[in-house]
Image: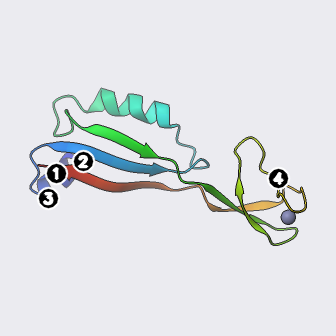
Amino acid sequence: MDKAAALNNLSRIARVVLEIGQFSGVEPDLLRFAFAAIKKGTALEQAEIVILVPPLLLYCGECENEYLGEIDDLRCPTCMKDQFNVIRGREVLVKSIEGE
Ligand SMILES: [Zn+2]
């Protein structure tokens, strides 16, 4: 993200907002930990990291219902099957980088 800072003429990054889906395979706590470890001596040193976790949107292959899944109960609330496809929940996005 030093490169992003240079490209945008930012000398210091104040805030990085990430969107991490619950099915992305990325663990927000580990990401925060990694971020803390790599930011020393970079434009990110003072940066706050904000991790947004979007709702998990699923599609039921059984009854074609779209529904919001709970991570500990992914069954379709209509037919109670777990034949779902993930519509939303695998994203790993940098939503914004703010600096000065
Ligand atoms: Zn269903």
Query: CA–CA distance between discs 2 and 3?
Result: 10 Å
Are the residues tagged 3 and 1 within 8 Å (C-beta)? yes
Are the residues tagged 4 and 3 within 8 Å (C-beta)? no
Q: Secondary structure under badge 3?
A: helix
Which residue is under mark 1? 5
Amino acid marked by disc 3: Leu
What number is the disc on residue 19? none
User: Residue 40 versus residue 70: which sits nearer the camera?
Assistant: 70
User: Residue 51 versus residue 38: which sits nearer the camera?
Assistant: 51
Give the image location of residue 11, x and y in percent.
Answer: 9, 46
Q: Earlier in the sequence, mark 4 or mark 1?
A: 1
Q: Earlier in the sequence, mark 4 or mark 3?
A: 3
**Residue at x-position 28% and y-position 37%:** 48
Q: Earlier in the sequence, mark 2 or mark 3?
A: 2
- Left or right of 15, for residue 27: right
Query: CA–CA distance between discs 2 and 1?
Result: 6 Å
Q: Secondary structure under badge 2?
A: loop
What number is the disc on residue 75? 4
What number is the disc on residue 7? 3
Amino acid marked by disc 2: Met
Query: CA–CA distance between discs 3 and 1?
Result: 6 Å
Give the image location of residue 8, x and y in percent.
Answer: 14, 58
Are the residues tagged 4 and 1 within 8 Å (C-beta)? no
Which quarter of the frame holds ligand 1? bottom right
- Left or right of 86, for residue 19: left
What number is the disc on residue 1? 2
Question: Crowding near pointer 1: few (<14 within 10 Å), some, many (20+)?
Answer: some
Query: CA–CA distance between discs 4 and 3?
Result: 45 Å
